[in-house]
Amino acid sequence: MERALPVMAALSFVGRARFAFGLALFASLLGTANSAAGTEQAAPASAPEAAATNASPVTPTYVGEKVCTQCHVVINEHFTGTVHAQTFRLNPRNELQARVCEACHGPGSLHIKNPVDHTALIGFTRRWGTAIDVMNGQCLQCHQGGQRIHWSGSIHQSSQLACSDCHNPMTKLSQEGLLRRESIIETCYSCHQQQRAEFRKRSHMPLPEGKMSCGDCHNPHGSITRPLLKADTVNDVCYACHAEKRGPFIWEHAPVRENCLNCHLPHGSNHDMLLSTARPFLCQQCHSNTGHPNDLLTRAGLATGASPDERVMSRSCTMCHAQVHGSNSPAGAQFHR
Ligand code: HEC
Ligand code: HEC
Ligand code: HEC
Ligand code: HEC
Ligand code: HEC
Ligand code: HEC
Ligand code: HEC
Ligand code: HEC
Ligand code: HEC
Ligand code: HEC
């Protein structure tokens, strides 16, 4: 249990520079708090000593952002550039939004009495120690539904992630989305190092180049399709950008229809075209050479002893079976055309 400190002692302990502060100001703050709290019972006592009362059963009340910003000056400067500040201050759509700081941090009357009591206010940093469900509950008051419809029960939720593990609403660090890092991919990489390594491989989609992001395929807030995929199947995720692979084709290649990942890796590969295995081995996982006219040149009378085996040259099998994703040519049953 923390020992309750008188407020002024607590503040000099934190440092005066950060909290533009003086005795006179403090008195006036409490005045403001009182009037903002109106008739509510928990109006703070007017003498600093009274603030030494430990976390009381008293229900905290709202004090208004003017009180908060007196102490949290620098933080407020950063916050002012964010979409929440602009909406809540200039165009609040309801009473809760008009509370500004306290819309997220909860009513602050007990906090201003004893700023070092971590149970007196909802904090969103790990060191503050507020329970994760409580933190997330604050955000979900306004952001339930939409993309977050499957948040509850999602792997990120059940792995005890807080909204604030990916978002920092106090400062505008990203162009969009109030993320903790400058971009979506850097935000994800902060925990998913393996995917960073995969996207560095020789073949990868242009994500490190900034043309797409993890969010094009995944919904970090939850999804009904593992692993957090944005569409109902892997193939539907891919068709969103590679529509020409959707078909339908006169001649379908069964593994393509089934799952693009039968041959491709989504994040990166050291084989070209994001293939999971090099050709011809890729094809030979499912096709044997038995029954294949494996020496067409011989049949055409063109073979010489020195002819290399066409099947392992360059694009190998796809040299002849060029329409491996499916063919619309009446004569394309073997995906030659
Ligand atoms: C009397 C000055 C004062 C006022 C007024 C004040 N705070 Fe604080 N606040 C502090 C101090 C000091 C700390 C640091 C306590 C600590 O680190 O143990 C703090 C900590 C916090 C934290 C925790 C930050 C973290 O580490 O996670 C939040 C959030 C916060 N204040 C929000 C508010 C809000 C919202 C208001 C208005 C309702 C407010 N404060 C009013 C002095 C003040
Ligand atoms: C939209 C919700 C939201 C609003 C509105 C909001 N905060 Fe915060 N606040 C957060 C979150 C989330 C964090 C944690 C940020 C982080 O992880 O660094 C935070 C962190 C803080 C901290 C600790 C920062 C640090 O780096 O130690 C303080 C102090 C604070 N807020 C005060 C305020 C004050 C004062 C206001 C109003 C001017 C305010 N907050 C408005 C959500 C909010
Ligand atoms: C009182 C309601 C309210 C609360 C609480 C709240 N938000 Fe918001 N949030 C809004 C509004 C309003 C917007 C403005 C955009 C809009 O109209 O949806 C917004 C926008 C956002 C955006 C989009 C930013 C952008 O650039 O488009 C993110 C991300 C966000 N909030 C995250 C959070 C997180 C994380 C929390 C909890 C720490 C939180 N919000 C708490 C109301 C709220
Ligand atoms: C694993 C990381 C992660 C977590 C956890 C997370 N988000 Fe997000 N959130 C994102 C990303 C990435 C975006 C997209 C930002 C963009 O489009 O630029 C986003 C966008 C948003 C937006 C703006 C777009 C929209 O859907 O309206 C809101 C609001 C939002 N998140 C709220 C929340 C809330 C509330 C929580 C907690 C319940 C949360 N987020 C948890 C990563 C996360
Ligand atoms: C704070 C850490 C953290 C951040 C940031 C984070 N994740 Fe995660 N993510 C996890 C944890 C923990 C798991 C649980 C599985 C594990 O241990 O890998 C997970 C799992 C996943 C999974 C696998 C789901 C499954 O069903 O196997 C995907 C996909 C994923 N995250 C995508 C993202 C994306 C996209 C982002 C960025 C928007 C992101 N994550 C940001 C921690 C994080
Ligand atoms: C082109 C779409 C796409 C993009 C972009 C993408 N992913 Fe994935 N991701 C997938 C698919 C599809 C799977 C399923 C893989 C499987 O089932 O084998 C997956 C799987 C995962 C998993 C589960 C573990 C694994 O590797 O199979 C994590 C974690 C993950 N992705 C994180 C990320 C992160 C972080 C980013 C951004 C840096 C990202 N993904 C970008 C499509 C994508
Ligand atoms: C958000 C759009 C988007 C989604 C979704 C997407 N891709 Fe891509 N993909 C691209 C872009 C852009 C390129 C690069 C095209 C270029 O360079 O002409 C690409 C290239 C590729 C390549 C060729 C790689 C190379 O080395 O040239 C393959 C294979 C591929 N994607 C497979 C997939 C698969 C499989 C999925 C589903 C898991 C998928 N894509 C989902 C945008 C997307
Ligand atoms: C049977 C294996 C296999 C499956 C399954 C497969 N592909 Fe491919 N894919 C290939 C091969 C082989 C190449 C290289 C073709 C070449 O070199 O001409 C390729 C190349 C690509 C390319 C880049 C060249 C191009 O044709 O645009 C994209 C994009 C692509 N595949 C997307 C997909 C998508 C989307 C799916 C799922 C609908 C899918 N692939 C399923 C084998 C496969
Ligand atoms: C995951 C298993 C799998 C992989 C990998 C695979 N195929 Fe197939 N392929 C099939 C199946 C199943 C059929 C349908 C066979 C049938 O209908 O009898 C088929 C049909 C074909 C056919 C048409 C022949 C016929 O019997 O109708 C050709 C040609 C073919 N594949 C070439 C390739 C090539 C080239 C590759 C490598 C790029 C490849 N396949 C990779 C499973 C696979
Ligand atoms: C030089 C061109 C060429 C190359 C290289 C080639 N094929 Fe073929 N493949 C053909 C032709 C032509 C046919 C059709 C023969 C027929 O209809 O009698 C065929 C037929 C097939 C069939 C269908 C066989 C059947 O029983 O109906 C499969 C499966 C097949 N090839 C897979 C492969 C695989 C796997 C590779 C790579 C290891 C490969 N092919 C490389 C030309 C080629």
Image: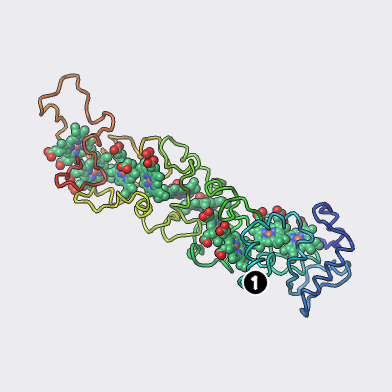
Q: How many marks?
A: 1
Image vertical order of residue 163 relative to residue 294, above or below: below
Identify the residue at horizontal 15%, vertical 29% (top origin).
295
Q: Is mark 1 within 8 Å of ligand 3?
A: yes
Q: Secondary structure at mark 1?
A: helix
Local crowd at mark 1 within 10 Å, few (<14), some, or many (≥20)?
Answer: some
Which image quadrant for residue 4? bottom right
User: The disc labelled 1 sits on which kind of residue?
Assistant: Leu
- The residue wearing badge 1 is 96
The quarter of the image holding the N terminus is: bottom right
Taking the view exactly as shown, the residue that stands out farthest to the bottom is 39
Tell me: 11 left or right of 103: right
Residue 173 visible to the viewer: yes
Residue 291 visible to the viewer: no
Between 231 and 337, the one lying in front of the other is 337
Image vertical order of residue 40 relative to residue 307, above or below: below
Position of residue 116 measured from the top left corner of the image (x, y, whole percent): 78, 60
Tell me: 142 left or right of 227: right
Identify the residue at horizontal 40%, vertical 35% (top origin).
270
Position of residue 80 measured from the top left corner of the image (x, y, whole percent): 68, 58
Indicate the quadrant of ligand 10 in the picture. Answer: top left
Identify the residue at horizontal 48%, vertical 48% (top origin).
213
Position of residue 22 measured from the top left corner of the image (x, y, whole percent): 88, 59
The quarter of the image holding the C terminus is: top left
Tell me: 192 left or right of 84: left
